[in-house]
């Protein structure tokens, strides 16, 4: 893994760890973010219908409302209980509690019906030592310390409780924002557990007793040997969190499709036609009886702001009986998804162009959210949205900033490199379009210039090292400036020698003429330097120039690249330089042909080079007045 990839991976790991710490230490910040994103998934499904499958449970609501009664009393409840029993309902689930004094008529009606489940209030609170006696003793596998306590229980009057099929608490546990997203199924007592109304009704319908229930906090509540109908039985597992709460699978906004006013149930006792009609609607079906009068208990849900509490109990009962549960994503699923998001971001930032990087990051974000949405719509898994969102947004921002900083550093290095090789104006153009510097070798016609100082080795042997350095720096500074003035690319310094080529990377049709004029300017500049009486004495240089095909580009190894020229053209230019007279310039025949008519030269040679054919050369006088130099 390269250094850049390692630093990017480390940055993403830091962002991922920070998202975990933030969600753990500051839930008040991350929680609302999660709630809003998850609520959006519920609304998306409810609006589009994607992932919604029909449920088999035919649940009927019987309600007291303005159309029926202005406020139900216990006598009217008793009449409804008898009426529903006469209509042959499967079970009556009363979202109500009857504390205080006894009401014999109501207790008698419940006893006669034999299928009534009533409510209690548990007074859920965490953490508080349990003070009530829980009626259910379950098999426990795991830590129940986070299961809420029934700290302030309140029940219906005793004769009613004894005659009812069961009683369960009506308490709900809204999240911090007041929205109900989960429903507690159990509450701890001092010696057992209190069940919720929906759980009591479900166990009654499935013929499951407390001894058949296994509580595994953070995993599931198992109803062993549940009777499914047609003589079949099986274990039903209800996904729960560590507080023994079930995640509510909100499917549609609150609309009571199967709703019967309580007044019609009472009327059916004396109206035969009404009785026949209602019996066709409610016979052998579970019925929830609730108070829908103004001021009755309502809660906020992801899909609506005012849903009766009875609708929450009905939703829990529907999920248990249908076996279609929504669950939280397991920790390893969340971690795998976040690691895949991080891998996608690392893949995206490897693109060369910033536009592609941003497009890739956007594609990764869309893919992650699409997978999260699909897991909810068709996998019944409610994903955690806050941490992946933090990872994607924070990771993308971090990687883009890191990429920008790295690019600026590379640009600075590139600028220094370009300014070392190329003229300043050409270096600026290449920084804007670095692709003009070929990445791999390219064969093209160039003109190569070699120069060196005559007698340098003998002179340097008698000088101090710092004087040699000062002399070369002074000399090369002047020569490089002239090379840049003529559009040359400085290839390398070889001891006291200098190699410059013309015709790349900038397109220069007159590269031969530029090289010749550069050579003349160099000779004249050396003579000017000598007239300033430098402390190391006068200098004399030789220059050789050759025009021909050569390979140019970034050559070397990945650890050490150099923008240079190779080929016979380089060797021939070097040979011409070594054969040039002191203070003179030798041109190849090809170079002379390119500038013929512009200069006066005489042919010399042939010049012989090792392993190369002899070549004719042309010598020019750098002091010839006809030569015009580039400013």
Image (cartoon, grey):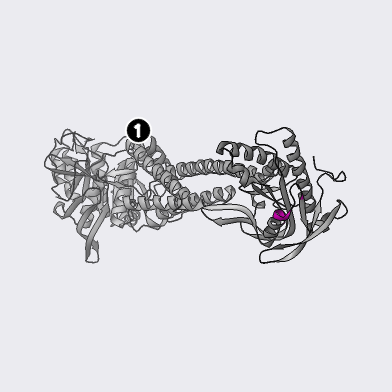
Q: Position of residue 542 (x, y in %)?
A: 72, 49
Residue 354 appears in the figure: yes
| Left or right: 536 in relation to 124 | right
Q: Position of residue 428 (x, y in %)?
A: 67, 42
Q: Is residue 583 magenta?
A: yes
Quarter location, residue 375 = bottom left
| Left or right: 185 in relation to 443 | left
Q: Which residue is mark 1?
A: 295
Q: Position of residue 91 (x, y in %)?
A: 25, 52
| Pick the front one: 51 or 581 | 581
Quarter location, residue 234 = bottom left
| Pick the front one: 565 or 171 | 565
* Residue at horizontal 19 percent and vertical 50 percent from the top: 215
Crowd around label 1: few <14 · some 14–19 · many ≥20 (10 Å): few
| Left or right: 479 in relation to 513 | left
| Pick the front one: 262 or 493 | 493
301 shown above or below 606: above
* Residue at horizontal 42 percent and vertical 41 percent from the top: 36
Residue 38 appears in the figure: no
What element does badge 1 sit on? loop
Quarter location, residue 11 = top left
Q: Is residue 152 magenta?
A: no
Q: Position of residue 491 (x, y in %)?
A: 65, 50
**The magenta stretch spans which residues?**
576-584
| Pick the front one: 563 or 493 | 493
């Amino acid at each position: 893994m390269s250094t850049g990839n390692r630093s990017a991976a480390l940055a993403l790991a830091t962002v991922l760890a920070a998202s975990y710490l933030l969600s753990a230490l500051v839930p008040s910040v991350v929680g609302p973010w999660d709630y809003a994103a998850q609520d959006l998934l519920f609304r998306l499904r409810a609006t589009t219908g994607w992932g919604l499958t029909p449920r088999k449970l035919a649940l009927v609501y019987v309600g007291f409302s303005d159309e029926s009664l202005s406020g139900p009393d216990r006598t009217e409840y008793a009449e409804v209980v008898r009426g529903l029993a006469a209509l042959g309902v499967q079970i009556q689930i009363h979202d109500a509690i009857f504390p205080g004094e006894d009401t014999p008529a109501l207790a008698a009606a419940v006893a006669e019906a034999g299928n009534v489940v009533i409510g209690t209030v548990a007074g859920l609170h965490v953490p508080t030592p349990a003070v009530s006696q829980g009626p259910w003793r379950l098999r426990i596998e795991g830590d129940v310390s986070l299961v809420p306590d029934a700290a302030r229980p309140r029940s219906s009057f005793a004769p009613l409780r004894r005659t009812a099929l069961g009683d369960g608490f009506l308490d709900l546990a809204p999240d911090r924002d007041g929205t109900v997203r989960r429903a507690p199924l159990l509450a701890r007592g001092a010696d057992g557990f209190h069940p919720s109304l929906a759980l009591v009704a479900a166990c009654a319908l499935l013929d499951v007793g407390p001894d058949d229930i296994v509580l595994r906090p953070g995993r599931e509540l198992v109803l062993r040997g549940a009777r499914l109908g047609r003589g079949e039985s099986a274990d039903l597992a209800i996904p729960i969190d560590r507080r023994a709460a079930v995640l509510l699978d909100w499917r549609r906004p609150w609309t009571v499709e199967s709703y019967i006013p309580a007044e019609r149930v009472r009327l059916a006792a004396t109206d035969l036609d009404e009785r026949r009609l209602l019996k066709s609607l409610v016979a052998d079906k579970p019925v929830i009886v609730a108070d829908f009068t103004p001021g009755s208990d309502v809660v906020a849900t992801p899909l609506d702001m005012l849903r009766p509490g009875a609708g929450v109990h009905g939703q829990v009962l529907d999920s248990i009986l249908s076996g279609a549960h929504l669950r939280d994503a397991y920790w390893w699923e969340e971690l795998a998804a976040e690691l895949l998001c991080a891998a996608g971001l690392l893949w995206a930032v490897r693109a060369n162009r910033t536009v592609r990087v941003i497009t890739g990051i956007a594609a990764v974000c869309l893919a992650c959210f699409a997978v999260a949405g699909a897991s909810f719509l068709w996998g019944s898994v409610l994903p955690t949205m806050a941490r992946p969102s933090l990872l994607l947004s924070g990771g993308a921002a971090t990687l883009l900033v890191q990429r920008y900083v790295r690019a600026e550093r590379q640009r600075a290095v590139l600028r220094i490199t370009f300014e070392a090789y190329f003229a300043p104006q050409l270096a600026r153009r290449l920084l804007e379009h670095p692709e003009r510097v070929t990445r791999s070798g390219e064969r093209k016609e160039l003109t190569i210039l070699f120069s060196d100082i005559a007698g340098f080795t003998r002179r340097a042997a008698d000088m101090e090292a710092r004087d040699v350095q000062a002399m070369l720096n002074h000399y090369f500074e002047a020569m490089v400036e002239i090379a840049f003035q003529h559009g040359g690319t400085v290839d390398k310094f070889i001891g006291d020698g200098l190699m410059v080529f013309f015709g790349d990377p900038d397109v220069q049709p007159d590269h031969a003429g530029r090289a010749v004029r550069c050579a003349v300017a160099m000779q004249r500049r050396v003579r000017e330097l000598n007239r300033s009486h430098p402390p190391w004495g006068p200098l004399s240089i030789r220059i050789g120039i050759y025009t021909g095909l050569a390979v140019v580009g970034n050559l070397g190894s990945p650890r050490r690249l150099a923008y240079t020229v190779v080929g016979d053209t380089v060797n021939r230019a070097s040979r011409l330089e070594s054969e040039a007279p002191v203070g003179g310039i030798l041109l190849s025949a090809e170079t002379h042909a390119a500038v013929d008519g512009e200069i006066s030269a005489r042919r010399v040679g042939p010049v012989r080079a090792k392993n190369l054919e002899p070549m004719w050369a042309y010598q020019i006088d750098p002091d010839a007045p006809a030569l015009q130099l580039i400013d």
